[in-house]
Image: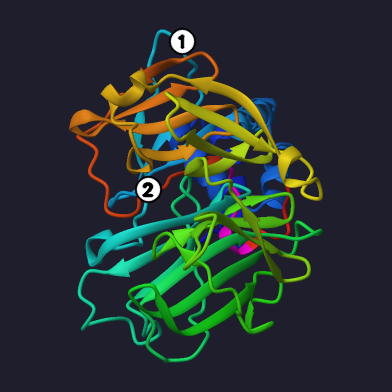
Amino acid sequence: MLNNYSFEFLSVGIQSSMADALYLPEDIVHLIFLRLPRKPLFRLKCLSKHWNRLISEHFIKLRSRRMMFLPSLPFHAIDNTATSEDMTPSKMIKLSSPSINTGSYKEVTIVGSFNGIVLLVLEYLNTIVIDPNSPYGHHMILYNPLSGEFNTVPRGGSYKSYNYYVYGFGYGTAADDLKIIRLKYLRFGSNYESKSFEVFSLKTWSWSRPSKLTDDSCFCDSYSSGIFANGFLYWNATRNSGSPLYLIVTLNIKTMEFSRIEIPDRYWMHRLGTYKGRLCMICSQNNVEGYELRVMNKPWLCSSELWSTVCSFPSSLLHIDFASDLGTLCILDDGRLLTLKSCNQLIIYDMLKDSYMEVDNLTSFIRVGKLQSVEYIQSSISPSDICSVFI
């Protein structure tokens, strides 16, 4: 970690290079910049015209670079700046994680992202020899994919054994009060023997248990992650009994109140996501060819007016393994999909234009977690500063 000594070293180095014509490689300079807090970084801009231009241009580019974090070990991401009109495909990039022994884990769950920081749940490879601070066999980290810096979230909660976890990451009305949501269950088949609802505040760096969890919905997957949009978290779920089968469990992060959105019986819900900042879903209708991208309107509208169809796209996508949600990693906010083609080939499909481009893989993509990715914007923010800096 860089401190005042590091800054003084840099200042002396610059003055020496000016006096003695010494050269510091630019890639080394960039790495140092990424680890500096903003205040000393901006002080460095005053040392020379070249550094002023270098810092400004470099970080403006970082602010605009969109990436997709993949469920893989070691960590990988996809550069999402390319479009379907570009001649060069999106590229897979191996991420820096020098202080994380990714070989100790068997699975990674991507919960969400904010300010360029990704929240991950890492499950240990050997559940017998585990971290004493993490009796669940897994722990959570806040990770900056650009710098490799991370911060471990305290364990919190009780030592009671649970076998089913559901997560969420977002905020209510104030973006500087981020919350991590953890729902814990002891589940046998479709029956929940015990439930626990816990909230971690990044602002106070502490866990709390705001209320009892009374919702009896069946979440679709253990280690699943909610979709955050406009102060709410949303999870795919099914009803234990009765009709309709599919529903969406919602959590108002400000009030910590749960509710439900029912999906009409004629629809099969495949994936939740966001489109232009609003909750959306990919679904299909019984006995109707193709798929629909539907976006949620104002939540207080009646059920018949709650959803609008953005576009429909053909079932010819079956040849790239889009027949079910098992092939889709995430819905991008601009109306594209990250999904899997055969032989572990990743593709980015544009639902609005019915076209796709292949990702230039470093290696054959091998996932070690749920088929869930997350979109983020690169930043130099430290995980410990995630609530104090806004992009």
Disc 2 or disc 1, which is closer to the eye?
A: 1
In the picture of the structure, the residue carrying the numbered disc 2 is 96
- Residue 266: x percent and y percent? 52, 40
Confirm whether the magenta stretch covers residue 91: no
Q: Is the residue 77 above or below the residue 2 in the image?
A: above
- For the C terminus, the image quarter is top right
Within 10 Å of disc 1 (Cα), the crowding (few <14, some 14-19, many 20+) is: few
In the picture of the structure, the residue carrying the numbered disc 1 is 86
Q: Quadrant of the rendered structure where residue 205 is?
A: bottom right
Which label's residue is closer to the chain start, 2 or 1?
1
* Label 2–label 1 contact, CB within 8 A: no
Secondary structure found at label 2: loop
* Residue 122 visible, this orientation: yes
Q: Quadrant of the rendered structure where residue 103 is?
A: bottom left
Q: Nearer the viewer, residue 207 or 382?
A: 207
Q: Is the residue 363 above or below the residue 369 in the image?
A: above
Rendered image: mark on residue 36: none
- Residue 283: x percent and y percent? 50, 37
The amino acid marked with disc number 2 is Ser
Q: Quadrant of the rendered structure where residue 276 is?
A: top right
Magenta stretch, residue numbers:
378-384
